[in-house]
Amino acid sequence: MLAVNSQIENAIIDPQNIIAITLLKIEFPVSAGGPVYLTDAASDWTGHDGITYLADGTLKSVSPIKAETSVSRDLFRIVLSDLPNLDNTFIYRTRLRIANTGVPVTLSMEFLDVSSEITSVLTGTLQIYKGQVSHVSSEVTSDNDSSITLTCSGPLTKLRNITNRLTTHNNQTSLYPNDTCFKQSALTENPASFLFGGNNGA
């Protein structure tokens, strides 16, 4: 369940005079050029997290937000404009050749209140998606516009396409220090000393 402050709650309920700014964070590893921060704002945007998101026209579209009463594991798609470098190699295709699955992706929104002459930024950030890249496709249209579609998923949606699942004790505790659910996972490569079900294999 999302937790939002009263300013964002009111903006969602009554969006008149509110402009939503989309903020995309793609955490490429250093070997693939490092993290990318993009926005659909009219100019570069410094978020409440202190990061400057670039308004260079790269972020073309994202999947619409769904309001559902049950837990959904649908895939989430992000379309980026993939412009060529000076040597005619494509920026994101080059990055994605190095790291094409398992790259963490976070999509958030911040809000502008334009109801008065002085535009104000609402306090807080609304995180609307967090997952990982599970599939990449590219397209070049007839007018030579090249785009990359990142299909993203949560860690449990398409397990075969996720390369950095948190299945070790060290990985899990790096995010959740008190979680010990994977403490014994390193032992699973050895024959089990206790067989589940029946009467312990007797």
Image (cartoon, rainbow, N blue to C red):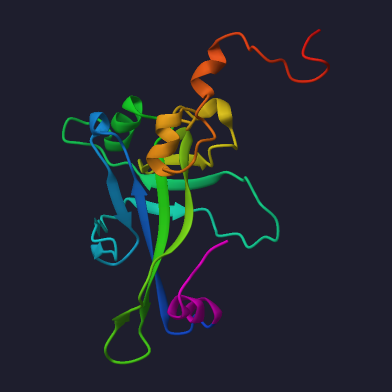
Prevailing secondary structure class for the magenta stretch in the rendered image: helix
Magenta stretch contains residue 140:
no
Question: Which of 45 and 51 lies nearest the eye of the viewer?
Answer: 51
Question: Which residue appears farthest toward the left when viewing the image?
Answer: 86
Give the residue displayed 27% in from the left and 59% down from the top: 55
x then y, percent, for residue 80: 38, 46
Q: Is residue 158 left or right of residue 57?
A: right
x then y, percent, for residue 187: 52, 17
| Quadrant (top left, top right, bottom left, bottom right) of the N terminus | bottom right
| Quadrant (top left, top right, bottom left, bottom right) of the C terminus | top right
Question: Which of 183 and 66 lies nearest the eye of the viewer?
Answer: 183
Question: Which residue appears farthest toward the bottom when viewing the image?
Answer: 116
**Span highlighted in magenta in the image:** 1-13
x then y, percent, for residue 111: 38, 73
Q: Is residue 140 left or right of residue 48?
A: right
- Picture quadrant where residue 139 is located: top left
Give the residue displayed 36% in from the left and 77% down from the top: 122
Magenta stretch contains residue 2:
yes
Q: Relative to 101, does residue 70 appear above or below in the rendering?
A: below
Can the viewer see residue 62 in this picture? Answer: yes
Q: Is residue 48 left or right of residue 17?
A: left
Q: Relative to 84, does residue 199 appear above or below in the rendering?
A: above
x then y, percent, for residue 161: 52, 28
Number of disc labels: 0
Can the viewer see residue 140 in this picture? Answer: no
Question: Which of 77 and 179 lies nearest the eye of the viewer?
Answer: 179
Give the residue displayed 24% in from the left and 57% down from the top: 51
Question: Which of 187 and 32 lies nearest the eye of the viewer?
Answer: 187
Give the residue displayed 43% in from the left and 84% down from the top: 17
